[in-house]
Structures are given as C-alpha cells and as structure tokens.
Image (cartoon, grey):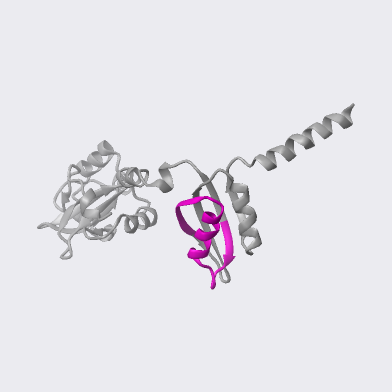
C-alpha cells in the first residue's frame, strides 16, 4: 500500500517559466483538476485547472502566490492520499521525496481501482452500520458477535465519532444477517443502517400487504 508502488510519470510537470495557456491545455487534455510546478526539480506547488482558465496570459511564475501546497511523500500509504483528494477537491496528487523533489503523481482513479480489489469492496455481503459507546467499544467484541453467528468480517471502518458515541460500518459475509442484527442489539449496540435482504422483514411486509387486500374485500 505504499505510494511509491503507484507513482505515474506520464503527466507533465511544469516549470515556472512555462505559459499558463499551455498548462491549462495540458490539464484539460488529461482531465486532471490541477497542474504541478517545479523549480530545479523541487516541487513548488499546484494550481487548479479552473483557476488557470480564469487567469490572464503570462507564465506560471506570475501565479506563484496562488500555488496550493499539497503533496504526498513516496513512503506514505494509500489511505493518506484520500484526505488530500478530498481536502483539495483534486483528482490528482503530486508525489515528492523527503527533500521535496518531484517524483510523479497518483490519480484518484488509480487509487480507487486498487481499493476495489480489497474484499471490503469486491466481495458481496451484508453491510451494517452500528452505534455504541465511544469510550468502551471493542473491535474484538464486534468481530466475535459476527463470528458467533457464523459470519465473517470482510472489513470495517469508523465513519462517525461523537462526544459519547461511535458509528462503525461493517462488511460481512453471512447467510443470516438478521441474526447478527439481533445479537448486536442484545449486546447494547444500535443498528443504525443495514443493507441486505431481510427475509423476516420481507415476510412481514407480504403479510401486511395480504391483510390490506383482505380488508378491501
């Protein structure tokens, strides 16, 4: 999961003496949100394509005060990149060495393509979001609850932390997800959301529908 394993180099990096128009055209050609500027091999910053579009003619040096200072180190990991994509509304992130030498870039598409291979995303299964006390929750207990119902955990992540609660989303493999729901609730967890076919719930809906039709007669 190290960034250096996913570096691409086909997207040109610009010098401060290059023209704004050329940089803008290159960004549009590649479909990337930002272009990157270097000076003597050292990364200087990024400029969004939308900002280039609105800038007057000249070279990139004239926009230096507008450079966005974001990058990721080559020894970072894929998870580190997600925050950068989100924070800077970018679909491409520059990769630099510890001495800030420009090494290449990673794209949002490449990163999410890699994540899509993980069982958390690639395997079919039930998805549960549970809520519990934020100070005393145990991932060991959560996994035991799933496994005690003959289920397996493909992956999980914390999606919300409050003052006194925490919400955790699970991707699980099981033939009877409703029994896992019930076990979580017995242990004091709240099932906030669930995504699966609940046979018991479907049966109740069918019976209610039949009852409504009976009343109509």
Report whether 78 appears left or right of 138: left
Relative image position of residue 100 (x, y in whole percent): 17, 62
Residue 145 falls in image quadrant = bottom right
The answer to whether 102 is drawn above or below residue 210 in the figure is: below
User: From the image, which quarter does the N terminus lie in?
Assistant: bottom left
Q: Is residue 96 left or right of residue 186?
A: left
Residue shown at 35% from the left, 53% from the top: 85
How far across and down, in percent of the image, does residue 130 sit? 57, 58
Apparent side of residue 180 relative to residue 20 in the rendered image (left or right): right
The image shows residue 2 at horizontal and vertical percentages of 25, 56
Q: Nearer the viewer, residue 38 or 17?
A: 38
Residue in the picture at 20% in, 54% down: 4
Q: Is residue 132 magenta?
A: yes
Q: Is residue 145 magenta?
A: yes
Q: Residue furthest left?
A: 40
First to last magenta residue range: 130-158
Extreme residue in the bottom direction: 135
Q: Please provide percent x and percent y for residue 110.
A: 30, 44
Query: Vertical placement of 127 versus 217: above or below?
Result: below
Question: Dividing the image into 4 quarters, which one contains the C terminus?
Answer: top right
Q: Nearer the viewer, residue 69 or 181?
A: 181
Which residue is more in the foreground, 153 or 58?
A: 153
Q: Quadrant of residue 21?
A: top left
Q: In the visual, does 141 lie left or right of 22?
A: right
Q: How many marks?
A: 0
């Amino acid at each position: 999961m190290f960034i250096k394993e996913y570096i691409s180099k086909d997207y040109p990096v610009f010098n401060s003496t290059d023209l704004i128009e050329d940089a803008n055209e290159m960004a549009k050609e590649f479909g990337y949100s930002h272009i990157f500027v270097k000076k003597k091999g050292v990364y200087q910053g990024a400029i969004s394509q939308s900002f280039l579009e609105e800038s007057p003619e000249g070279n990139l040096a004239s926009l230096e005060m507008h450079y966005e200072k974001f990058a990721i180190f080559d020894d970072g990991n894929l998870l580190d990149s997600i925050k950068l994509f989100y924070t800077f509304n970018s679909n491409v992130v520059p990769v630099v060495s510890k001495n800030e030498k420009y090494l290449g870039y990673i794209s949002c598409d490449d990163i999410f393509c890699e994540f899509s291979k993980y069982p958390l995303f690639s395997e079919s299964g039930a998805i549960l979001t549970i809520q519990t006390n934020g100070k005393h929750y145990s991932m060991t207990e959560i996994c035991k609850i799933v496994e005690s119902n003959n289920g397996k955990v493909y992956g999980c992540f914390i999606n919300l932390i409050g003052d006194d609660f925490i919400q955790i989303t699970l991707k699980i493999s099981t033939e009877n997800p409703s029994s896992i729901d019930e076990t979580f609730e017995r242990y004091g967890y709240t099932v906030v959301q669930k995504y699966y076919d609940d046979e018991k719930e479907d049966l109740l809906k069918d019976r209610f529908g039949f009852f409504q039709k009976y009343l109509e007669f």
